[in-house]
Image (cartoon, coloured by chain):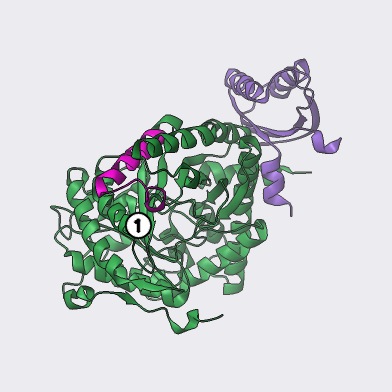
Amino acid sequence: MINFWEVNETNKMVEQENLDVRTITIGISLLDCMDSDLQRLNDKIYDKITTVAKDLVKVGQEIEHDYCIPIVNKRISVTPIAMVGSAACKCPEDYVTIAQTLDRAAKTVGVNFIGGYSALVSKGMTTADEYMIRSIPQALACTEFVCSSVNVGSTKTGINMDAVRLMGEVIKETAERTKDSDSLGCAKLVVFCNAPDDNPFMAGAFHGVTEADAIINVGVSGPGVVKTALEAVRGESFEVLCETIKKTAFKVTRVGQLVAQEASKRLGIPFGIIDLSLAPTPAIGDSVAGILEEIGLEYAGAPGTTAALALLNDQVKKGGIMASSYVGGLSGAFIPVSEDQGMIDAVQANALTLEKLEAMTCVCSVGLDMIAIPGDTKATTISGIIADEMAIGMINQKTTAVRLIPVIGKGVGETVEFGGLLGYAPIMPVNQYSCDAFIGRKGRIPAPVHSFKN
Amino acid sequence: MEKNRQKTIITVVGKDTVGIIARICTYLADNGINVLDISQTIVQDYFNMMMIADFTESKKPFAQCQNDLTELGKEIGVDVKCQREEIFEKMHRI
């Protein structure tokens, strides 16, 4: 039977160490909504989302109460809209109407975000894909809850450099259109390589075409819990360090597994995956950088950071995989800058640069995340940064992503405030040398040699 | 039979005073909730109790009992928390 100490340990994790379930995300297929008539398409999308997800928020709150565990976000991901709208949309503005429909549906069911305003163009773009991508700035400027992502490369296909070039421009334009709110639109736009079909985390969530009609995916969190556990093993060997992280990750993931099963049962929607990611928040003590410091670095970004992060990421997976049979999504440590107080401190102390962050993305999930850069950064430079990050993903057969925010009207040394879970960020300097001629080339980077496994 | 039981962990933390257990147990008894196990300590005048209770025959819905117990805790001047057992089972048992 459960004892006193175990109960206290669990409750302490929740009350003092910010243990929470970061998100319950319902993935909804919109493939059966496809129609050549735009109005009918929009009506069907609205009806399907508001029917399938109508109880999500209520059930989420019930589970929170039953177990006294906070479930921070309730979200929806849908089939990539470029595909869903391909028969009906004849121009970018047509796609914007779908974004507005998604926004309206999200508001009706009361979720925090809806993801899937997305296009998968890792090898080539259809005309519809291009319309959709070009509609992103306007769509993000006129909606509140919609998140957008574009997959521009994969290990199997190589990198679509035409899409990379276009995304540089789209990010700039999104920044420009949302400049009144410190270019907030860019915080809801991710560029991916090897995007997973079942990621529950925003802004990159979408419901892959290989998925069932509806599915529950759950993202856990708990950097604060890992950090606190590590405080007890200061100065111990790597073996002890790794063992502690693994055990903690196991416990955290089991909570996610329980919540996922309960949500699945109560909503009557099958359970998909648990995403094991350590997702930080701006709250004090809920920081991945804080864990790196606890492992033994003065600041995140100091020499040794990449090794420490690699170790952390691997142990989180090893502990989590034991805790749930269905692990998926991004599963690793997130290293967003603005959402993590320890990362913000590291940038402000000049310990952490864009280049070091890039190195760190080689060994952990996701990539250059929530990084504010000067508003006058050229579109081609943004494309160059994207291309670098995509290459890391392609060669290492892992997911990488870029979520940069060129803050219009602000420069290095200034700070931008996004609010809530998105936090605030010091604007980081970007290498000033040009990559115009490289980005100007047409076509794609071929798939790497190790993709030929058949 | 064991599987259908709705085991719940009730934790009570706060300044020690006369009759904490009595008042909580009275509420549970009045509502058909069976107590399976109690453990309790007092650390520096602070009362710390954990109770495992079976809600299977409860006369009221779980959410209502949670609210009632929280309110009762406020009256006594202690924090009462009422959680389904699975969260602890999952986390601490393989």
Is residue A91 in the magenta section? yes
Q: Which residue is painted at 19% across and 54% down in the image?
A: A173
Which chain is drawn using green?
Answer: A
Q: Could you tell me residue A318's position as x and y percent?
A: 61, 66
Instruction: Spot the residue most to the bottom.
Output: A449
| Range drawn in magenta | A82-105
Residue A83 is a magenta residue: yes
Q: Give x and y (percent) for residue A434.
A: 16, 75
Judging by colour alone, the chain drawn in purple in this rendered image is B
- The spot of residue A35 in percent (x, y) is 41, 43
Q: Is residue A381 left or right of residue A53?
A: left
Give A236 or A6, whichever is nearer the viewer. A6
Disc 1, SS: strand
Can you say which quadrant of the picture contains the N terminus of chain A?
top right
- Asked if residue A313 shows in the view, the reply is yes
Which residue is at a point 36% across and 70% down the rendered structure image? Answer: A390
